[in-house]
Amino acid sequence: MTRSTLTARAAAILFLITWVTSVAALPLYGGSALGTELALAGRTSVLVASLLEVILAVAVVGTAVALYPLLRPHGAGTAAGYLAFRGLEASVILVGVVAILPAVARPATTASPGLSTQVVSALHLVHDWTFLVGPGLVNPVTAVLLAMLLLRRRLAPLVVPVLGLVGAVIVAGQNLAVMFGLTKPVPVLAVPLFVWEIGLAITLWVRGIKPLRRVDERVVGSGAVAPS
């Protein structure tokens, strides 16, 4: 098994981790406070959800780090942009984690933080806004960058990048509508983007990212190019 195959499979596993942790964390928080008045869940549940989101943020960056050397030969600018935007997405997720933790706990103690209901609700809302901005708006940008590269270089079956592009447009459009108060979140609209990530993970595991075929050449005195 080649190094590129191992790297692609590591990226596939990390994509699956991002999917599992993002789906599992939301109900543990007690749901989303966007557009509703849902109460925050209990201390242990929120701490577990926060830990899952820390793992999510690490895995988000890990996918880009793993894919960077595989994508760079096919498009150095796109590979760098993907890495940068995934880092930005992870940073926003961690801001939300740090915001929500004071609502349920103080470091090094099991005592209640003693915050008022209004403050807890505000911290819950801050967390949900960070999830809207990070996975909700930044993630579609990363999906478009990667899907366009896969499509342009034919690095994956056609259906995979198409799902990424369609899912990115739907998720970004929905979250912009939520941001401006035009609608409430509709979780089912995120399905195409989740399917894109699963399809991408399967593609990376089964076929990986094929390296460019290079032909060794040298420039001769006349300016012509001849095989070495």
Image (tube, helix red, strand yellow):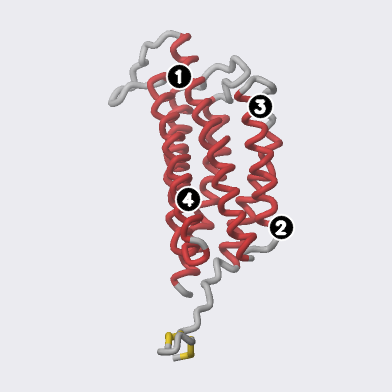
Instruction: Give the tally of numbered discs.
Output: 4
Circle 1 SS class = helix
Label 1 CA crowd tier, 10 Å (few <14, some 14–19, many 20+): many
The amino acid type, in three-letter code, at marker 3 is Ala
Q: Picture coordinates of residue 199 (x, y %)?
A: 64, 55
Q: CA distance from mark 3 to mark 2?
A: 27 Å
Whether residue 187 sits left or right of residue 69 in the image: it is right
Q: Name the residue tied to disc 2.
A: 159
- Asked if disc 1 and disc 4 are in contact, CB closer than 8 Å, the reply is no
Image: 37 above or below 109: above
Q: Quadrant of the C terminus?
A: bottom left
Task: Count neighbours of disc 3 (C-alpha within 10 A) and say few if under 14, some if 14 to 19, many if 20 or more.
Answer: some
Q: CA distance from mark 1 to mark 4?
A: 31 Å
Residue pictured at 52% horizontal, 72% vertical: 211
The mark that comes first in sequence, 1 or 4, is 4
Amino acid identity at mark 1: Leu
Q: Position of residue 27 (x, y in %)?
A: 57, 30
Q: Which residue is mark 1?
A: 123
Cβ atoms at labels 1 and 2 below 8 Å apart: no
Q: Residue at x 52, y 25 (%)?
A: 129
- Of residues 155 and 41, the one nearer the viewer is 155
Q: Nearer the viewer, residue 209 or 150?
A: 150
The residue beneath circle 4 is 81
Give x and y (percent) for residue 201. Answer: 58, 57
Mark 1 to mark 2: distance in Å? 40 Å
Q: Which residue is mark 3?
A: 177
Say which residue appears at 53% left-offset and 29% top-offset: 28
Q: Mark 1 or 4, which is nearer the eye?
A: 4
Disc 4 crowd rating (10 Å Cα; few below 14, some 14-19, many 20+) is some
